[in-house]
Amino acid sequence: MNHFRVIEVAAGRQPADLLLRGARVVNVFSGEIQHSNVALVDGAIAGVGDYRQAKEEINLEGQYILPGFIDGHIHIESTMLTPEGFAEAALAHGTTAVVADPHEIVNVCGLDGFRYMVEAFQGLPLDAYFTVPSCVPATPMETSGSSVGGEEIREAFKIHPSSPALGEMMNYPGVIHGDSKVLEIMRASLEFTPLIDGHAPTLRGKELMAYAAAGMSTDHESISAEEAREKLCLGLRIAIREGSAARNLKDLLPVVNQLNHENFFFCCDDRHPGDLVDEGGVAAILRKAVSSLDPVVAVKLATINPARHYRLDRRGGIAPGYRADLVVVNNLKDFQAKLVIKDGTLVARDGRYLGNIPRREDQRVKNTVSLPHLGDKLELKLSESKRRVRVIEVVPGQIFTRQKLMDAREAAADEDVNLAAVVERHGKNGNVSPCLVKGFGALQGALASTVAHDSHNLILVGRSPHEMEQAARAVTDSGGGLAVVKEDRTLCRLPLPVAGLMSDRSAVKVSELHEKLQEASREIGCLLEEPFMTMSFLALPVIPELKITDRGLVDVQSFSLVGLWLDET
Amino acid sequence: MNHFRVIEVAAGRQPADLLLRGARVVNVFSGEIQHSNVALVDGAIAGVGDYRQAKEEINLEGQYILPGFIDGHIHIESTMLTPEGFAEAALAHGTTAVVADPHEIVNVCGLDGFRYMVEAFQGLPLDAYFTVPSCVPATPMETSGSSVGGEEIREAFKIHPSSPALGEMMNYPGVIHGDSKVLEIMRASLEFTPLIDGHAPTLRGKELMAYAAAGMSTDHESISAEEAREKLCLGLRIAIREGSAARNLKDLLPVVNQLNHENFFFCCDDRHPGDLVDEGGVAAILRKAVSSLDPVVAVKLATINPARHYRLDRRGGIAPGYRADLVVVNNLKDFQAKLVIKDGTLVARDGRYLGNIPRREDQRVKNTVSLPHLGDKLELKLSESKRRVRVIEVVPGQIFTRQKLMDAREAAADEDVNLAAVVERHGKNGNVSPCLVKGFGALQGALASTVAHDSHNLILVGRSPHEMEQAARAVTDSGGGLAVVKEDRTLCRLPLPVAGLMSDRSAVKVSELHEKLQEASREIGCLLEEPFMTMSFLALPVIPELKITDRGLVDVQSFSLVGLWLDET
């Protein structure tokens, strides 16, 4: 910010670059709505009041100006968009800054993935503040592309000095038991920031107390009002999550009141491309929140509250000297972005980004898929056996699973029991780990995905090893992605050449392809509404009950690897 | 903090060091009052809840536990106590941390004064976070002991890396007009912290807008609700000041409501030793505030709000992992500190500090008074003249003054018109600047003080040059201080050997001596209730209307030096 010009315009001695006339300005500091002009210069807000001189002006009579929305916690990779496509799509609906944890790409590419994300956002019209991933890999029971310890933590904070926090500390058992590696990671991050993002699903009582005592400053995993209230009392800021995979807004809003609301903010955590295109991110949360929250309070949770918590200075409010990141809406009900202004420039209108952001190639995050020869490794000889097997049973619309025990022959005869496998794809050890999964339906083909939390190995589900191998090839050919295969035909494919996680196409295009993939999955008999989301969590061994990694089945309760066959635990 | 032990105690696996049983705990995060035990270990709070095992315990049934109070803006020098005496007195009433601007001592001793304050607090049981003085000297129309520019700003932040902010930017005309030296000072501080404390008395409209736009983050100078509301709307945090010299609480409280209260905090700014001993600092503000503010909201303004604004991490709340800085009170009305716990240790009981903090000598801040030979320089030949003179007229209980124009002979005949003078005492140029002052009464002696904002030159008021010189000698002999003289006798004296500003005696002793000084001043005919406070502001040329510095009379309105005689402007 050029101090001098901002002062000159604020004092009324020079004309503004852009004058927004006659709107109702939501003041997140006083909690009031002011009828006023807003003068912008050099990307900043110079003044709110009786300003009249400007090079350009926009009449906003009858409309509302809000601070740009800030997503307090998101994994950009969940949108399957590269930073450019994400910025276009997010800005279109009024999100002007995000606090993002890039742990997906760091699991695949290590600090090169971190560098890529940070560098890709330089010069983009959306501000991304990356937390430093703390749990890579998420568990020792899987093979990821890289791992993060104290040294990598320090290096990451040097790469990105404006990182606001250590990223979500998912290893809560490690924290609670004072695991020395976990404490070393926290100590390393405390050299750079006092903030540590928490992640404590279902944690309560003294375990939660111990987790908070270790230095956590947020939590975004509450699913009930009681859980959120307990965490709030411990001084944790509550990130109310309402994304595509998990939706907690309705359950948590009753905890927010006027005496405590500064301790809450909104976040998406995960957002699918279609939802981002159709509804936006934070805008969609606001739209729902105002049914039971004062609109100005709701706006605070979407703007100044995350800004203050993460110390994103001079953001999140409409005041002199603040960044000119603004959203214009018709009312405080549907929060449809009529205009979006970023750094003083109009960047979106009526929910559409104006222009196209040129894509940036980065070889460090390309060609990340390296598969072993699969041979007969996907095969399970069920019908010959009298033994009992562990089967992962998926639950429609949920990311947890159940463990189902079946007779091998019963499983072989059940059309809803399909083969599944995780294939190590980082070129580390070539692990191939087959298993059985129930709940996808009687598949007549196979699904493949290189998006599989958090290690992002290749995950396959299908009726036959042959089709699974075919599907594996379909995604490998494009450097990673999603595919649906029937016999020898690839019915549909979404290439994700960046780390096997992201596409450099537009959000609309990615969303269309994603939709087509889901249609194709239905064509081969899949019963799940979002089979690729379900698959992406099948390999995440921190969510109950039975999961599969490249090293085998994981019993999440006992946090240990178990055999496919019940008698070989 | 030893992460490991805090986690162990929080998890219930190890006993606490100290257990506080059965109190009502004021939770500043949820806004609720919880009936609970509090477990402390290693100077930190480990847990709030059902803890029972501890090496020691205190039964607090029926009492309230609050977070230690935080004074959001204070000049410690205003108490005339060195850090040790201040810590004893402040802790006694529950203040466990202060954000302090040491600009008084820096005006005298430069960065050595800053180093002294920072080092003196190391190891003291009170946390002082020093802002870096931005305006030394306050104006170019006076001679101070040192001056601060961009380089000194950088050096100070290196001396005190936990400095939260640039100190109050009093040169608001310089900011509003984009003065290059002022901008350079702000730019230098932005290399270390985004926070700049504001100081904008009576500033409104576009001038205020320009001031805020330059990057201010607080203001503590509002004297009316309208002024505070306007500043709040511009994103400034409002420090509600209620000290000894200025009292704004009653006027500003009406602005605080549940939608905006996180933007307010309490501060004393200036606090006289007697008030500090009798009523405390922040405790006294809380006591008054709860007559019109919800008690939990009031506690937030005294604890978590300043902590969050100044980023004093893990302070200001009662939660796991937070510093164990606590105040126990009988009720939420009088806020009398029954117990004060600092870093987990009981340090005060029933308003008395337990123990004596050993005093630390520091030669860098001693022997700071170096006077010129006064000779006949204090004399004004009034009765021989027919000319008109400018007379400073003081207003009882106020720090502003009026300019009164009098015939010289009329002035000479008026017993309420006394001689006054400012004598440069830093050994820089030996300036002696005599003038006339009305309103002290028909003095029969003289008063002297080396406390004279902000340059802290020697200020004298008396009926005769001889007695003024005698008074000057009385304070010089002890390295600075306050004195009352009658003829050749020193009636009373308060030595302030540290920078001519502070005494290393106890708050009670300093307060007693200060009281005696005021009695002595009445003995020599002074009509003012607090003559030394009035004198200390006589030389501050940023407060209207007519002031005196070592360089002469200052017309504050025109911000320029003027002559004593009306015809020599």
Image (cartoon, coloured by chain):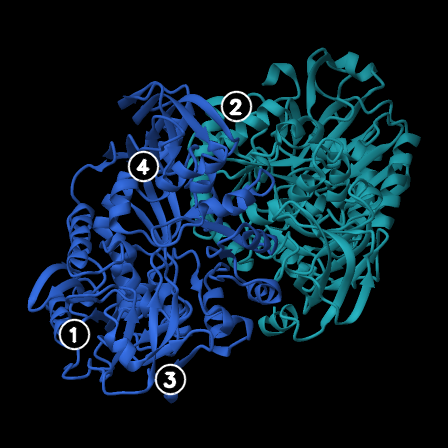
Chain colours: A cyan, B blue
Of the 4 image quadrants, the one containing the C terminus of chain B is: bottom left
Name the residue carrying label 2. Answer: A204
Q: Earlier in the sequence, mark 1 or mark 4?
A: 4
Residue B337's label in the rendered image is none
Q: How many marks?
A: 4
4 and 3 marks in contact (CB < 8 Å): no
Q: On the image, numbered disc 1 is attached to which residue?
A: B464
Q: Describe the element under mark 2 as helix, strand or loop.
A: loop
Badge 2: how crowded within 10 Å, few (<14), some, or many (20+)? some
Query: Which residue is identified by label 4?
Result: B43
Where is residue A15 shown, x and y percent of the image? 71, 73
Q: Distance between the residues labelled 2 and 1?
A: 76 Å
Q: Residues within 10 Å of mark 3 (few under 14, many from 20)?
A: some
Residue B9 is situated, as x and y percent measured from the top left of the image, at 36, 27
**Residue A436 vs residue A296, the one in the foreground:** A296
Tell me which chain the residue with mark 1 is part of: B
The amino acid beneath tag 1 is Ser
Relative to B38, residue B403 above or below: below
Q: Nearer the viewer, residue B565 or A83?
A: B565
Asked whether disc 2 touches disc 3, contact meaning CB atoms under 8 Å apart, the reply is: no
Query: What is the distance, in whole Å, between disc 2 and disc 4 at their CAs?
Result: 24 Å
Check disc 2 and give the amino acid type. Arg
